[in-house]
Image (tube, coloured by chain):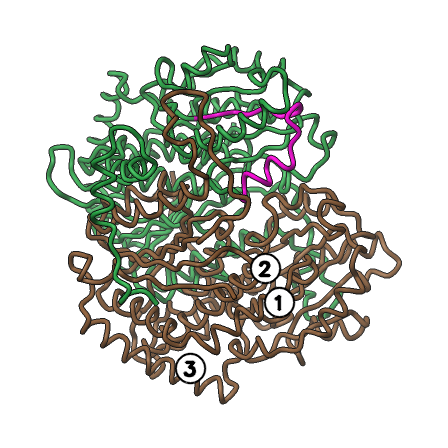
Chain colours: A brown, B green
Amino acid sequence: MSYIKLDYNYTMSEFLENGLTDEELEASNDAAKKGLSDFITLSEESEVGFSNLPEFDLSQIKKTVKASKGQYNDLIIVGIGGSSLGVEAVTNALLPHGYNALSFGERGCLPRVWFADNVDPHKLYWILKKCEAEDTLVCVITKSGSTVETISNFSIIYKWLNENLKDPFSHIYVITDPEKGPLREFAEMHNIKTFSIPSNVGGRFSVLSPVGIVPAALLGLDIDRMMEGAEEIVKSEKEKILHLSAIYLSFIKRGLNINVMMPYTSRLKSFCEWFSQLWSESLGKRYTKDGSEIHAGTTPVGAVGANDQHSQLQLYKEGPSDKLITFVELGSHDFDAEIQAGFHPEFSYLTGHSLGQLMNYELHATELSLRKAGKPSLKLVMDGVDECSVGKLFMLMQYVVAVTGLSMDINPFDQPGVEEGKHFAYGMLGREGFEEKKKEFDDQYIKSDEYIL
Amino acid sequence: MSYIKLDYNYTMSEFLENGLTDEELEASNDAAKKGLSDFITLSEESEVGFSNLPEFDLSQIKKTVKASKGQYNDLIIVGIGGSSLGVEAVTNALLPHGYNALSFGERGCLPRVWFADNVDPHKLYWILKKCEAEDTLVCVITKSGSTVETISNFSIIYKWLNENLKDPFSHIYVITDPEKGPLREFAEMHNIKTFSIPSNVGGRFSVLSPVGIVPAALLGLDIDRMMEGAEEIVKSEKEKILHLSAIYLSFIKRGLNINVMMPYTSRLKSFCEWFSQLWSESLGKRYTKDGSEIHAGTTPVGAVGANDQHSQLQLYKEGPSDKLITFVELGSHDFDAEIQAGFHPEFSYLTGHSLGQLMNYELHATELSLRKAGKPSLKLVMDGVDECSVGKLFMLMQYVVAVTGLSMDINPFDQPGVEEGKHFAYGMLGREGFEEKKKEFDDQYIKSDEYIL
């Protein structure tokens, strides 16, 4: 079984100037315990469901996917936010770099994968340009069944399927609410294959539901191993969840408003984007649960080592002390290769080391250099990147964010702040029932030429 | 000629609760004027060279690239930080989405492009797995000629070229310092084609030098147009530079420590990463120019609309008032497509609108929604994404960051904070002259098991 370790030495006053005291961490630990206990209650009452996903029966998914094997050259994921970020994180971590440029045979007769997430016409044009409808499977993912970007992109893809196929419906999978929503109605009307997102699993907590698991299986990944990893967190890692939540809580309490996630591997770059959504939407809240105004939330920043040593590190080291950095280190790097820099005598010191070693040396050097500058960092150490470790990482961070939010006495499972913007957009689009919002928009979206150059 | 407009209405107190007053902006404008004047001096004294790049003679580059046309199926860029982020921004903006999955013919007989930036063995393995040495051109980019990650990746690629080709040197371009550095020595010894980065152009300001221009030309992009766009900023946009710098300065002075760059197009996602380096390394400084401790620097965050409305927006709207957001709007979107959502009556309101319209409606809705919540934003509006507008955007932001830094009385052109980490890594790698650093590292990189779970 793969491991995931939490090393928080360089957050503590024993090692870091102005680091956390044991008492400070203890107090946060008590808060985190309350948060975890609240979470367990919510989970037992089935209010929140993500921690139960590892018990999900995967046999229908595996059967369906097995039957489709070899049929598709392309898989288009139509979804946005929680309906695409998790799948992107999975594919970035677990598929070869530049996977879509491999041939069908090199891919093991598995499809390429495209993300129609943004309503970006340039992006969608080029995706469809590359696909042939008869070899394409379209996976539409929206829990509500009515996400405007997803429906808009899908409308264009659906037309394209319709124009090119006799039976477009067999080329569509719908992943949506188990009972309601217009996309479910559409799917049922046309006998489209559907998978359900449990109603107590929110978008940003859904990567281990069919939202992430169906695409992962279609791409040949070992979904059982992913679930095993996730399950181990649920069953055996309460201490780690508590400690990591407590550390985050301590620095939030101290007023550090930036939370950097910095894995030292390019394979977790999209994971950072997934984490950014999880953190932002869960913890960025105007009100506590009992309605006091709080304007909570620290800002997640994704960075990738060693790349961002050549971009962000200067600021992290010399800038203000407003950040906590979470590094991710890999115990071993797949396909590690020896550096052979004999082509110039100045580089002889590199020969004999490997790329993976260099990566980890750089991480350790950065940890120390930041510690010396009084900047706190902690580190997750995983043995490597595979289905199991990725499953663990997802589940660990979902727990940590949920527990952190509950400890702060906010609701980490809603996102009330995005409604108003949606309603203004509905108004502009002329949707029935949003005439007032249209009027409000027209009255208030005013600009003066004086401030336009 | 394409346009780029600056709309800063929603930073001003006339429209935004607690927005900038005219006096406040005026004061910042005076500071920015001093910064610009300092910049012009540095530029006239040839201390800083990026603003002169549009006058660069491109004929040698064009000739070389023309002669290579059709010869290569793959282009590998070996470089990190300023030697890769600009090229990635250019390719993301100007090439088709999923470009590397197009066939040679569909690409107009131009090469695919790969970035060997990070020392990530998994990434490098898959890049080389896809390329055939005889059809591959390797572009090694490092100003110093000794960047450890670049040299390490190149050593492995060079070995691969050597093993597969009689004349590996003709498959290499070197882009480095005009006079010195081990990579230049290596190139001269083997008669390798080289291009020079002017010595007064630093990595993060080098995208319009051969660093970005040679790869852009190799990928069939119109480098003349890119330079024309950049030149227009140098010649005609001093007012815009001053105003944008002044707005940034005003919010820095107010203590907002997060600077969000949020274009509403997926094509500028990598531009955000380029901008993040530019901003972080230039403005994140411990000391002022005269040596007073200041710990300056606000943290750049990249976001992409509409995607991040489903990720970051909740935090931006409801969280603390610690952010200034810079939106980028496109006047028109290439390949815009009409939404045809007749497949379910609930979506009929979408029909007749286009994806690009929806994108811009969402941006306007977000602007207003944030304004109502008292969160400041400004907006750059460009007519579209092409070589000219991208050249403008690069040059504008380079100026703005340089002027902002000089106005803050810091040196925006150095990065002293990254040296220590490099030296620790050299020590660990056993490089001669870094024995003391190795000892310091060993003595100080200490962890207690008590803080590892």
Dot 1 or dot 3: first in sequence order is: 3
The C terminus of chain A, quarter of image: top left
Image location (x, y in percent) of residue B433: 24, 28
Q: Which stretch did the figure color magenta?
A: B122-141
Q: Is residue A242 above or below residue B63?
A: below
Q: Residue furthest front?
A: A352
Chain bearing mark 3: A
Dot 3 or dot 2: first in sequence order is: 3
The residue to which callout 3 is attached is A39
- Residue B408 falls in which quadrant of the image? top left
In contact (CB < 8 Å): disc 3 and disc 2? no
**Could one spot residue B53 in this view of the protein?**
no
Query: Would residue B340 appear left or right of A67 to someone viewing this image?
Result: left
SS under mark 3: helix
The residue to which callout 1 is attached is A211
Task: Evaluate whether label 2 is on the same chain as label 1.
Answer: yes
The residue to which callout 2 is attached is A87
Task: Give me the residue at 48% from left, 55% from top.
Answer: B364
Q: Is residue A158 above or below residue B382?
A: below
User: In whole angstroms, how far apart are the C-alphas of marks 1 and 3?
Assistant: 22 Å
Q: Residue furthest right?
A: A166
Query: Would residue A76 appear left or right of A294 to someone viewing this image?
Result: right
